[in-house]
Image (cartoon, grey):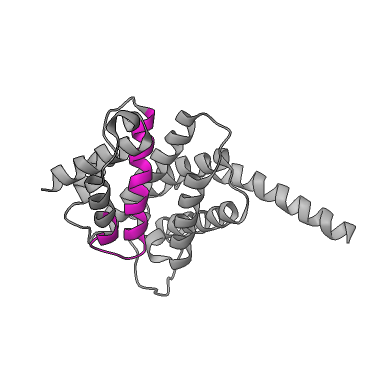
Amino acid sequence: MLRLRKEERLLTECTSYLSSIFVHWEPAFPLPEPQPAQPRQKVDPSQLASDTAHLLTKWSLRCLVEDSYDETRTKEFLHWIEKAVIKQGEGMQFVLLDVGMKADVLRLYHQAFEAQCSSSLSGKVDVLQLFSNIMICLLESQGNLPELHQAVVSACLPEATHDESRREAGLFLLSSYVHELWRGATSAELFLSHVSLVTSAKCNRQKASKSSLSQIRAICHDITTLKS
């Protein structure tokens, strides 16, 4: 029993070390577009790069979601996937086509929002913004988006804002939109219903002027204005 526990501890430590190593890997060749499985006479370097990126992404994701949430490891992984997968263009397709990987991406996305991090609010918001940008890129690559898509993104992810509470409110609101589309919806009806409820609800403006609720209300009003 003691030997088994020692082996499990060593395996856990090894996983952490491997994760730290893998985030430095980058494809040496452009990732190809997904092709139907065909027998190959010789190794195609670009296909090998794609297979490697797929394997590392899948393994790294599974390790992250099966362990307790680690903000530092998650941030390192997000920077890596942005560099090694998202910016490769075609690399996004293996994420979208792999059902298990797609589910793990959503699980990690929610863990990032729900986690009580030891970092500052600004540090947590930076991670959430990076993650949200990646999710939006993947959704846009997938296509078949609602007509209000750009209105939602523009309102929730403004290009320039130094208001941390505004950024955080926008990211949390956007997470509902992303979740609905990630699960296969094309109209975002639940998200739009939420926006309508928020904009129509009455509140004490004097007490809520600086609250997160007032920030969410303002963003919902922006979405309603932009899509009209």
Which residue occupies 44% across, 56% down?
106
Majority secondary structure in the magenta region: helix
For residue 102, above or below residue 71? below
One can see residue 32 in this view: no
Residue 175: x and y in percent read 37, 49
In this view of the protein, which residue sits in the foreground, 207 or 66?
A: 207
For the view shown, which residue lies furthest in the left direction? 228
Tally of marks: 0
Q: Position of residue 180 (x, y in %)?
A: 33, 59
The answer to which quarter of the image holds residue 209 is top left
Examine the rendering and report whether any part of residue 142 can be seen. Answer: yes
Q: Write the residue at 36% across / 64% down.
A: 183
Q: Quadrant of residue 143?
A: bottom left
- Depth check: give the residue in front, 90 or 43: 90
Whether the magenta-drawn stretch holds residue 142 is answered as no
Left or right: where does residue 41 sit relative to residue 196?
Answer: right
Query: Going 39% across and 73% down the picture, which residue do you hit?
Result: 37
Q: Quadrant of the N terminus?
A: bottom right
Answer with left or right where residue 195 lies relative to residue 48.
left
Magenta residues?
Answer: 164-191
Q: Residue furthest top?
A: 162
| Residue depicted at x 23% and y 40% | 154
Residue 115's x, y, as percent?
A: 54, 44
Report x, y in % for residue 214: 31, 36
